[in-house]
Amino acid sequence: MSDTVTPLGRNGMAARAAQDIPEGWYVNLGIGIPTLIADHVPPDREVVFHSENGILGVGPAPEPHKQNPWLVNASTQRISIRPGGSFVHHADSFAMVRGGHLDLCVLGGFQVAENGDLANWAQSATEVGKQIGGAMDLAVGARQVWVTMEHTTKQGQPRLLRRCSYPLTAPGCVTRVYTNLAVLEVTPRGFGVLDIIPGLAFDELQSRTEATLHRA
Amino acid sequence: MSDTVTPLGRNGMAARAAQDIPEGWYVNLGIGIPTLIADHVPPDREVVFHSENGILGVGPAPEPHKQNPWLVNASTQRISIRPGGSFVHHADSFAMVRGGHLDLCVLGGFQVAENGDLANWAQSATEVGKQIGGAMDLAVGARQVWVTMEHTTKQGQPRLLRRCSYPLTAPGCVTRVYTNLAVLEVTPRGFGVLDIIPGLAFDELQSRTEATLHRA
Amino acid sequence: MIDKFVRSMAEAMNGIKDGSTVLMAGFGEVGAPHALLDGLIEQGAGNLTIVVNSVGRVHKPGQPVQGVPRLIELGRVRKVITTFIRAGSIAGDAVRDGRMEAEAVPQGTLAERLRAAGAGVPAFFTPTGAGTLVAEGKEVRDYDGRACILERALHGDVALVEAWMADRWGNLTFRDSSRNFNPIMAMAGRLTIVQTHHVCDLGQLPANEIVTPGIFVDRVLHVAAGDPKLPA
Amino acid sequence: MIDKFVRSMAEAMNGIKDGSTVLMAGFGEVGAPHALLDGLIEQGAGNLTIVVNSVGRVHKPGQPVQGVPRLIELGRVRKVITTFIRAGSIAGDAVRDGRMEAEAVPQGTLAERLRAAGAGVPAFFTPTGAGTLVAEGKEVRDYDGRACILERALHGDVALVEAWMADRWGNLTFRDSSRNFNPIMAMAGRLTIVQTHHVCDLGQLPANEIVTPGIFVDRVLHVAAGDPKLPA
């Protein structure tokens, strides 16, 4: 990567994704970078955030003296609830997810394939760790599925692949990917590049990507 | 029937069934005679009545000046709700029924067969009228299914049969029948007579019954 | 700003197409969105499939025909899916004369099919109806020694719902037994239209007491409809 | 008089058998019936199948081992059914060493399976998990052009539930996000045992605000447990 290019940080990726969320959408934010997105949606733009543990209308983290121990999000961080927010039980909460009522979920990812396959819960079929949580339901149920992740692993291995090598979260579910280098959409002919960070050439992006990119 | 024998009336049948409902049971009462049962349970015996339209803890009909137009039972009669009662939606209401949480439902019947088959919603497969309501769910879901009905039709035809001729509500569901002449239980070898009105002989009861009766 | 309130019945009914499946909530008169149904009659969509608990009442001569029977009388209903239909009623006569189809379903199966539609369950097994006419043409399978039949989710293109209170996000509460089919039809409707007795400011409905969260609601019309009537 | 309150933990735990499937509510620390789980540890039943959202936390040396990890450490758990298990945790080590089985399920499927058990649905189709490892060994069928897998209801012999308020009929309310798995596990349990922060007179909980009606509850123990802690 050219020395002059600064990849986005975690908050930079979150802010870039937040920019694209329209007013009025019902949105679930996954653990990690996605959780940061809420803070980057301008307060005057009404977006209703859903949390798997039965909350619609999640608000920002409260100040320490206003914390409510009975109110946590899907990452078990203490949060607040907005006026108009509501509590439901877990089956009703996932009815919102699985019934197709969410406009969008934003998930973290290990790998995304050019056919929209997502892998984000385990690195092999045989490992003990199985961190499924609500990701499979969200990936299948939300109308749009966006993924935020580093464009490559820490070791420089590509995460945007022809086919995922890790166990799938859901096949063909991802509609858009926000990385530290680019915004890409999943199309019938593979990844289309919607946006690229300043100073990074298309070919440089391609060299960090296993799947073939095309200009959207 | 001997002249000295007085068959039970509607309230008599209801009272007889009420006598057998223990404290603490969750009970759904069908339209017609079953609805009358609630009034015959002594006030100091706590029985929780369920109504399909989302009420647990149905209370007696209110006095005219206390009527609440927003509170009706499954027969759309205005009712009251007891302290401890609750409202749920229709799917949650039938979750109580279908999930096996009711101790008892009492239904009206056209015909009951000695194998426990119940017919109570139509007289032929082809007629236009199809008055299913919640009866099929109740017949299948409640732990005990009691039927209250006249022992014979107005024309004197038996209603306790070897096999039902009308379309079934559910196969093999009835556990007990309260008629104007007797109380019968459904056993693996057919109807057992638990109780018979004073003055009526077993053979007289048998003569008004198509199925073979035995002494319980 | 999210604001699901519409200002007129015309706006509430906008876009309902011929051939739609319409879910009509209520149990008897209680919780029934009569104003919206009048609006649908006025709006003109036809060839409808109406999902409603009961079309059982037999019409008394001299009384005005209203609600679903009126829609049937106008020839706008292709099919009803219902738990209770009676010979000699307006609906029964339409079925007898071949002017309308009727699918009779157990009430709990109806409720569960609606909830399934709202919850993303395309099909489920149930013992209700097994071994009866309701099972005809349906897959049968034993679970725990008991015959069960496969039932499908029941979506509405439109759901008509009556609420007691609503806010601009479309959060709803219901009064007493008027809750009945309203929350599950709200979930099952692709376009969920609500008539509400009362309007609340956002935040006025406690988060623990909202029964239908606004995510299931598209349009809300304020209609001070008064108390449900006793059946005529 | 119906009175579901029990006076002691021993009474609450009475009769729980070896080999039981135990549903353990809560999401993180919130809504988790820790006192009842301590009671179960004390009670002694073993060879248990535990259904719980997460056994993910990695134990920090020097901190006491509590809750489900403690039950696992004691060798009392045959199997966990969970959405989140992490390598290096007490649960993960038990699985790695072959001392315990683990079934990993999607969280929405877990919730729906519990609700299905409570609602009398023996099995249902869902697109969640189709085309993944979760689908292994399960029947697949297309609905609306989408692959779906058949999932089974998940009953508990015992459900452990935490409520905010309860009355003697077993009616329950929950505080804020502590509702989570509690109502559906209450429905899915053959023996549902509740610990409640507060006790109400019958009639004190408004009929419209009761979240879990008493029909789903067998025993209630008053435990003033205090606020949920932050994760260690």
Image: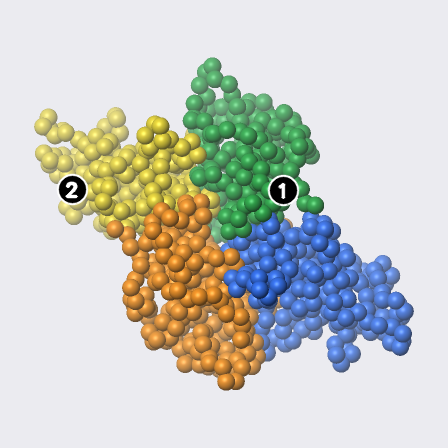
Chain colours: A yellow, B blue, C orange, D green
**Residue at the image position 52 percent from the left and 68 percent from the top:** C28
Instruction: Give the amino acid at mark 2.
Output: Asp
Q: Quadrant of the rendered structure where residue A110 is? A: top left
Instruction: State the residue in front, A206 or D87.
Output: D87
In front: label 2 or label 1: 1
Q: Quadrant of the rendered structure where residue D40 is? A: top right
Q: Is residue A145 above or below residue C221?
A: above
Instruction: State the residue in front, A77 or D54.
Output: A77
Q: Quadrant of the rendered structure where residue C12 is? A: bottom left
Location of the C terminus of chain B (image quadrant): bottom right
Name the mark on residue D168.
1
**Residue at the image position 49 percent from the left and 23 percent from the top:** D90
User: Outermost residue, top direction?
Assistant: D62
Q: Chain of mark 2?
A: A
- Give the x, y percent position of residue D220: 61, 37
Regarding mark 1 in the picture, which secondary structure is present there? loop
Q: Chain of mark 1?
A: D
Location of the N terminus of chain B (image quadrant): bottom right
Residue underneath mark 2: A195
Dot 1, how many residues are within 10 Å of its Cα: few (below 14), some (14-19), or many (20+)?
A: many
